Image (spheres, coloured by chain):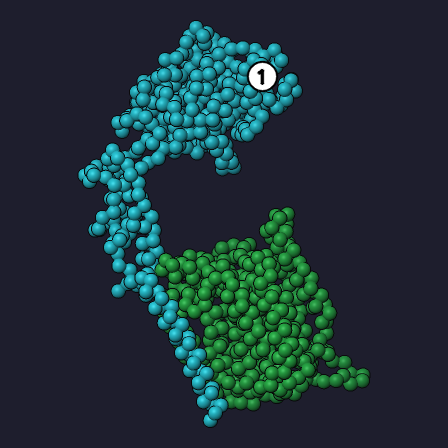
Amino acid sequence: MRLHPFTFSFLVFFLRIVFIVKSADTDRAEKFAVHRSLSHHAPAVAFESAHTNNWAVLVCASRYWFNYRHMANALGMYRTVKRLGIPDSNIILMLADDAACNSRNHFPGCVFANRGHALDLYGESIEVDYRGYEVTVENFLRLLTGRVEPSMPRSKRLLTDDRSNIFVYMTGHGGDEFLKFQDSEEISAFDIADAFEQMWQKKRYNEILFMIDTCQANTMFSKFYSPNILATGSSQIHENSYSYENDDDVGVSVIDSYTHFVLDYLEGINKTSTASMEDLFAKYDPVAIRSHPGVRSDLFHRPLEQTLITDFFGGVAHAEVMTARVTEGHTNAPSLLDSPFAEIDPINEGSGHEYELVEALPALADWTRDPLTITLRAWGSLSVMGALVAWVTLKSRWQRSS
Amino acid sequence: MVHAHAHEFAFAVVIRVLLAFSPLESFLQDDNQLSSSLTSYSRLLEGVYLFRQHGIDPYTGGTFRHSPLLLSLFSTVIPATRIPPKLLWTFFDAVSAWALVNIWRSRSNTRKHERDLRIAAIYLINPYIFLPCLALSTSTIETTLQLLVLLFASWGQSSPSLLALALLVHLSLPAILLLLPVLLLLLSDPLSHLASPRPFPQRLGKCILLFVEFAIFFVALLFASTLAAGGWSWMRNTWGAGILLPDLTPNPGLWWYFFTEIFDHFRPFFLAVFSLHLSVYVVPLCIKFQHDPLYAGFLLLGILGTFKPYPTLSDPGLFLSLISLFPETYRYLRYPMVTTLLHLHALLLLPLFHHLWIGTGTGNANFFYASTLVFGLANGGALLDCTWAGLRVAIGEEKDGWVVTQE
């Protein structure tokens, strides 16, 4: 006996809006096939990135007006990753000084990265998470490892999970295995390596792209030992990184050479781009950059030709297409779809994808929803009311006449 | 029954019909003051649509909170559209006005009285009554049923009265408060005994039979409701709404704001307190006014109007219109002017602050809440004054040198 007919009706209503793929192939394969909807590759499963969300940590570690270019570096990266789809909620921007509102800034509220001050990187729609003296080694390491004070607001936390790809960009003044923060302290390559290891142990990242633009930058990633880290830097040991150009009206150098180069390349990338990291690294020109950029990929398990730029720089959402076919029989699906009349069988999709809105249970006989029954019920209820009214009227008439 | 003043009455009804077809209606539909989530006509249409066209149980969602009896009525006999219901609602109001006049005639024991037309006008032109009618709020049906209950009880016809009460309780559970005064009224008479209090003349044992009759009607309608709804889930959505308060849409009542701000772990306690608060008035009022149960019923309708979980303007409006039945109390009202002005104040503030809050967004909920407090104060003041006046009538004229006070 059905105890709650309308609970079933409710569930049936939901089952009617399940998507079904018509497929000739009815063999069972893996349960979930991750399908990259935007890609032109037909990559095998192992080389696709398994990330579901993207984060970016952009650090400018030096202050003072003459380090304008470091802030422009970080802001250039900020605008690029935002353009490519990472939202502000997933970007941690750390600027050690305020170049835009500096009293020496001839263009108040603006930060430019090119001579000719054409494109303002600062003015609108910006969210700086760590500013000024909040940019410290301790805060940076706490941010990465997640060991922050309970009072730290959500916007200043790195809320990554084991499926997050993180783009970590650092710029400032550095040297052999160190980076200077705020002119008062340093972070060493060992510190960052240990922080990344903590993140790996805590499952706080899927893959990390570490990019650093300082003097002797490549030394900073020499000490990493955690898996799934791809690192690139602007210059080798004993080599300086140089700025690119000055702007005469701003009065200082506005961008660094390596970062300018990378940003220039990324200008040609959009969200649907299939350019790979290998393409970027192959484009490195030590003559143009005036230093020797380095790449470290031994910790990175995927081939660089198949690692997309947008895997790190963009926030491209992947659609996981779960194909389902409804059959009669016992279900092993989650509770909402739990019903003795239906089963959702995830199967591997074939080459043709047709999506149809199909009635899931055409054979289900639900007598309570039959239009005839509904009309009968309504009229039955009405007739009960009418009978009561009639009886009462007759009774009072009879009482009055007698 | 001589239909005196029939022409004037018909004229008033015609004016109401014309108002119903005015463009005023578009502003009033779904206004929070005129229809609550239990009485909104749009929700009724939604429920009927889901029920008729798709066979979906309208009680599975949170929108439809009308009784299944209305569901069956509007999916069969009455077309659930926009034009015929306007005439129907005006008809309901006309029936209510007729019932009010006849209650007055029973109470004053006359067949034609000079005040008849005034009473009908006080009802039909009362903005608290005709605005919800224009908004097609089902609270108009509840008002009609309330007046029919009192009418049949005044006429001494127990079965129609109890059937109407059973229907009313099905539409609006708090109306069960009226059961005791109606039973007492059926056993006594509607004539004014305020001036001469005496113990209740009949034996209360006779109530039992009447109560059994009411219970039979109630159960029969329960069966009809379950048949229409196809299950028992309707009870939680209709009656349960007044007890559990799932919907905190603003209305002119006093419950909604309180329950937006209390902590969840106090919710059951306060729900119990508020519901109990409604029921504690029944027995004391019936005992105190056992000599005039119609007056007790009138005061309980006032309690309902002030403290109901999902009131609309028609509940206190009915109370105000019913004051016209008791002219013997007018001279003993202590502060009628204050209450009138408070009501006027509230009548102006309620839509204004509601618009400021929800329409333009320049105000906030506290504005509207404050105006509901003023409204509650106005209603409470009217209640207290009428209670005082009803008791004061028994004492009579003040003698020289003596002053009537309350200890």
Camera-side residue of A329 and A195? A329
What hue does chain A carry in this figure? cyan
Residue B329: percent from left, percent from top: 69, 79
Against A209, residue B169 (above or below) is: below
Against B112, residue A374 (above or below) is: above
Residue sitting farthest toward the bottom: A402
Question: What residue is rendered at 39% in x and 28% in y?
Answer: A165
How packed is label 1: few (under 14 Cα within 10 Å), some, or many (20 or more)? some
Residue A208 appears in the picture as rendered: no
Camera-side residue of A273 and B407? A273
Judge left or right: residue A236 versus residue A9.
right
The residue indicated by pointer 1 is: A117
Residue sitting farthest toward the left: A27
Residue B150: percent from left, percent from top: 55, 79
Judge left or right: residue A222 versus residue A140.
left
Residue B247: percent from left, percent from top: 49, 58
What hue does chain B carry in this figure? green
